[in-house]
Image (cartoon, rainbow, N blue to C red):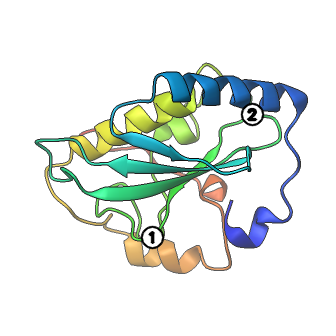
Amino acid sequence: MTSSSAASRKALSKIACNRLQKELVEWQLNPPAGFKHKVTDNLQRWVIEVTGAPGTLYANEMYQLQVDFPEHYPMEAPQVIFLPPAPQHPHIYSNGHICLDILYDSWSPAMTVSSICISILSMLSSSPAKQRPADNDRYVKNCRNGRSPKETRWWFHDDKV
């Protein structure tokens, strides 16, 4: 969720709270390599530091992901965006929106925050060039006024990066 829509978020269901508490404990015991959860008192919004993997274009670069959990998580995917500045990548828009199928059409309740993070790091690590998506300017212009990336009809056509 963008900050403009954060106030209108519905509270997490009991199932979502239990699941997130379980994931948070697991994260604290066994965090995925290259990620650090920034602890807050808000279970519904996580901020996660990402460190680029060694040997990649993003090696040792630091970014932040914002993960907003919907009322019915894990039955519904969380919204995941990069906070500014977003990395330059063919599937990451300058407003932080990420074109990655598991965040939308291919979401499964079996996925976790850790598995999302690992997928995002894998996507970053496989990129041969630091560049924005070809339609970045048009997309970002159309996303003004706080539109969520979950409102976008993504076209997943490039699985090379």
Q: Nearer the viewer, residue 61 or 157?
A: 61
Tell me which corner region of the image, top left, top right, bottom left or bottom right, holds residue 160: top left
Disc marking residue 118:
none
Q: Is 145 in front, or is 17?
A: 17
Q: Secondary structure at mark 1?
A: loop
Q: Are marks 2 and 1 in contact (CB under 8 Å)?
A: no
Q: How would you rate the neighbour count of disc 2 (Cα within 10 Å): few for under 14, some for 14-19, many for 20 or more?
A: many
What residue appears at the point 15 percent right and 41 percent down from the top-left corner?
54
Query: Residue drawn at (45%, 77%), measured in percent from left and top?
Result: 138
The kind of residue tagged 2 is Tyr
Looking at the rendering, in which quadrant would you find the N terminus?
A: bottom right
Quarter of the picture holding the C terminus: top left
- Of the two numbered discs 2 and 1 on the same chain, state the one appearing first in sequence: 2
Q: Is residue 63 left or right of residue 5?
A: left
Q: Which residue is mark 2?
A: 73
Which mark is nearer the camera, 2 or 1?
Answer: 1
Q: Residue at x 59, y 58 (%)?
A: 149
Would you say residue 161 is visible in this rendering?
no
Counting from the top left corner in percent of width and height, residue 10 is at 88, 50
Residue at 51% in and 22% down? 29
Q: Which residue is mark 1?
A: 84
